[in-house]
Amino acid sequence: MIIKPIKAAVLHKKRLIVMIAFIGALHMLKAQLPLNSKAYHDSLYTALNISENDSMKARTAFRLSHYWAVQRDYKQAEKYLVLGRSCFKNNRFLLGMYYRTVITIYTYNDPAKSRKALFKTDSLLSVFKTPDAYTNLAGAWYSEAIIAQRESDEKKSLWIIINKVIPLAKKSGNSATLATFYSQVGILMMNRQLFEKAEEYFTKVIQMKNVLPAKKNTLVRVYIYSAENFTYAKAFKRAEAMLKEARKILDKNPGATDHADYYLAEGRYFDETKQYQKALLSYEQGKKYAGTINDKDLENWLTMKKADIFFKTKQYPDAEKLLMNLLKTGYTYKLDNERRLYDKLAYVSNALGKYKDAYEWQKKCSVLSDSMYQAQLDKDIVAIEAKFKNSEKEKTIVKLQADKKQEELKSKNQKLTSWILGIAGVALLIGLFFVVYSYKNAKKLSVQKEINHQQRLNEIEQQHHLKLVQEMLDAEERERQRIGRDLHDGLGGMLAGIKMNLTQQQKTDYHNLNTVISRLDESVVELRRISRNMMPESLLKIGLETSLRDLCELLESEEISITFQAIDIEQNIPNATQMHIYRIIQELLSNAIRHGHPSSIMLQCSQNQDVFYITVEDDGKGFDVSILDKSPGIGFNNIKNRVEYLKGNIEIVSAKDEGTAVNIELSIDSNRHERENIS
């Protein structure tokens, strides 16, 4: 047997708890589905086919997409996602639900895509103060907590759930949603072996059982997690009580998809209380249910638990057979699974006296092990290698005894020569190793220096480009201001003076004089409009939000209505940055009116700390976005330069006869952008 030190055994136990808790978190999305998920799917499918309302059809399609994402059939999930999006054009709330569903599909497959969809969901739905909006926002932020947990950042995951998810769930008034997130906090606490804290959150959910929907599986899963928590804490009687409560619910719902998770918890309880035969039966039952719901990960984990029982009861051949089957069925698609499987095979082979196999398995395991286990694994390898070498030595002795005594009569000089040659060979190999090692390190260092140098050049070039853009924009703005002042103060004053003189003249030619005065009035109005476009006075006096509202009122007409929404815009944005934002929006609105010929335009501006969001949507004739790559035009280049200067990004969504939507994110960090007084 391989005997590990106590410290390594403790680490192994901690790793085991982390793995089981991780499986609980992996299946936590199931707590958001009814107990009979197949019947739930069928009802949604029927509703989708008979629904004539586009809004209801989109919502039903998104729910079906969520269902298939939980079942890990991502092709079906994406199919219903696309179907739901095709049911509407310009509905802000449904677009938010669309991005919420994108998050669910890609939480496990593409975290970066999921995070991008999260910010869009938050931007779209945060303006709505309805239970439905709060529920969707809570679910969206919960996916971010799952990503943090999968990245082993449990502290961040816990912070997101407590400070973002649970407050939103409370605002929604949805008891089932709130209970789901309480239980997730309990799982995170259990994962960190804070069993009393975990019990506190699980108890909160159990106390809510009278208000939880009977068809949801939230309560049964909390009983299962509580049983696991009490098992880890060695409170076996309380664990048994939780299992009985879970069993009552499952017996009433034979079609529930939670049976496999129940049998995993029950088997763990029997395992810890040394009822090994009952544990084997539980794990086997769990495997059967996991197979029916096509949960391969859970099925493989239950097989691994069966192998552990066989090892504890010294049924080593059975344990080896199960582990070898796992090796063939693709359980090693994750490195941690592969490492764990090699480790167990090494133990079983060692127990069976297959020291050479054990040595090979342990070597494979050591390659994949992390730093926490590396030192201990080295000791295990040495121990197995020693047994293997001793076994080989014993075989050699037997063979030597059968051979002629001629091999035993080798001279001492030959032995000494062999030793010297061996030592010299070892020394040569060590020297060669260090030469190769030093060469590789030097080569890596050289490559890294080259990469660093190239990165520095790119940074200098980017800074130079930004400086040129800023100088160009500043020069353009100063020229606008100068022309505006000249028009307003110079030519405007002259026109006003001419008007006054004309009004004081004798009314000899009354009709002609009135015509001249009327045209002068029109000239003064037009002059003020040009001056205002050149240099908006309201931007300097009463801030960005009011200036944008004035701009919308100025551009609005009987043919075009402009809706303006401002969310959390702060007053301390640097003046230069305000001017850039104003010019960007001025150009976007002018382009929409001039080229799109819409009947309505929606402008939304919002701020989240140092990020400023701009959305302009119109119902105009739209255009082919690829045209911008070929001939962008001066107006678009001005927008692009200003966005690039503010380290932002721009997204344009449009098609012919379907309107245009422009989304812009800008960085307005006051510590990075220099404040300027615009005079």
Image (cartoon, helix red, strand yellow):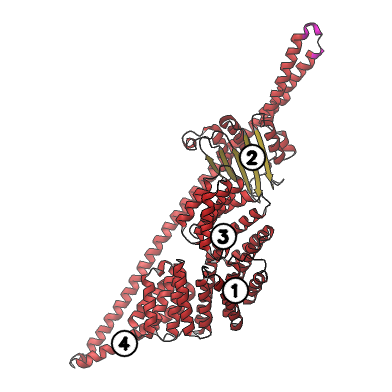
42 left or right of 668? left
Dominant secondary structure of the residues highlighted in magenta in the image: helix
The kind of residue on which mark 1 rests is: Tyr
Q: How far from the left and from the top, in percent, is residue 270?
A: 52, 82
Q: Which residue has dot 3 on it?
A: 143
- Specify the quadrant that holds the C terminus: top right
Q: Give whichever of discs 2 and 4 has the lower sequence position.
A: 4
Q: Position of residue 88 (x, y in %)?
A: 55, 44
Image disc number at residue 391 = 4
Q: Residues within 10 Å of mark 3 (few under 14, many from 20)?
A: many
Percent of width and height locating residue 230 = 59, 79
Query: Which amino acid lies under the numbered mark 4 shown in the image of this protein?
Result: Ser
Of badges 2 and 4, the one in the foreground is 2
Q: Residue shown at 43%/83% (left/top)? A: 311
Q: Residue at x 55, y 35 (%)?
A: 636
Which is nearer the N-term, disc 2 or disc 3?
3
| Residue 508 forms part of the magenta stretch | yes
Above or below 575: residue 349: below
Vertical order, 129 against 201 (above or below)? above
- Kindly identify the amino acid type of the residue bearing the numbered disc 3: Ser
- Specify start and end residues of the magenta stretch as a single range: 503-510
- Of residue 444 and residue 39, the one placed in the foreground of this image is 39
CB within 8 Å, label 4 to label 1? no
- Residue 186 magenta-drawn? no
Give neighbour class at mark 2: few <14, some 14-19, many 20+ (Cα, 10 Å): many
Mark 2 and 4 residues: CB-CB less than 8 Å, in contact?
no
Whole-angstrom CA distance, mark 1 to mark 3, is 23 Å
Q: Secondary structure at mark 4?
A: helix
Residue that lies at the very extreme toward the top in this rendered image: 508
Residue linked to disc 2: 603
Nearest to the eye among marks 1 and 2: give it. 1
- Nearer to us of marks 4 and 1 is 1
